[in-house]
Amino acid sequence: MRLKARWSCLRKRTEMKLQDLPIVLGACCVLHNICEMRNKELGPEMKFQMFDDEVVPDNCVRSVNATYARDQIAHKLLHHNLAGTSFL
């Protein structure tokens, strides 16, 4: 939720090329994590705009198979240079 509040390009449809999207998403995540580690507060104008439209219950139950499949997909994307992380 704070990630979308901090980076407005994540809150709306984008006009960027599809092949550039992983790089932009990765950059937003890296910069967001740096802000979080340094305890940078969101400005009042950002807090006003925050709206979590993707509510996921904290007690979400995932099957072992679903978790394994997700982890395998993430591993293949990351280790076969398909996740747009070549800039890291």
Image (cartoon, rainbow, N blue to C red):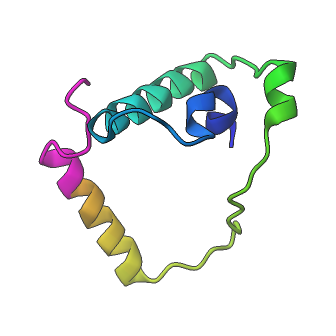
39 lies left or right of 67:
right
Q: Looking at the image, which residue sits at the far left?
A: 80
From what the image shows, is residue 23 above or below residue 71?
above
Considering the whole magenta stretch, tell me its main secondary structure.
Answer: loop
Q: Residue at x 26, y 63 (%)?
A: 73
Residue 32 is one of the magenta-drawn residues:
no
The image position of residue 37, as x and y in percent, is 58, 22
Q: Write the start and end of the magenta stretch as one range.
A: 76-88
How many numbered markers are drawn?
A: 0
Quarter of the image for residue 70 reads bottom left
Q: In which quarter of the image is the C terminus?
A: top left
The image position of residue 80, as x and y in percent, is 12, 48
The image position of residue 81, as x and y in percent, is 15, 42
Q: Which residue is drawn at 50% across and 21% down?
A: 31
Nearest the camera: 75 or 37? Answer: 75
Quarter of the image for residue 40 reads top right
Q: Looking at the image, which residue sits at the far front?
A: 15
Residue 87 is one of the magenta-drawn residues:
yes
Q: Residue at x 56, y 31 (%)?
A: 9
6 lies left or right of 21:
right
Q: Which residue is drawn at 51% across and 78% down?
A: 62
59 lies left or right of 79:
right
Quarter of the image for residue 60 reads bottom right
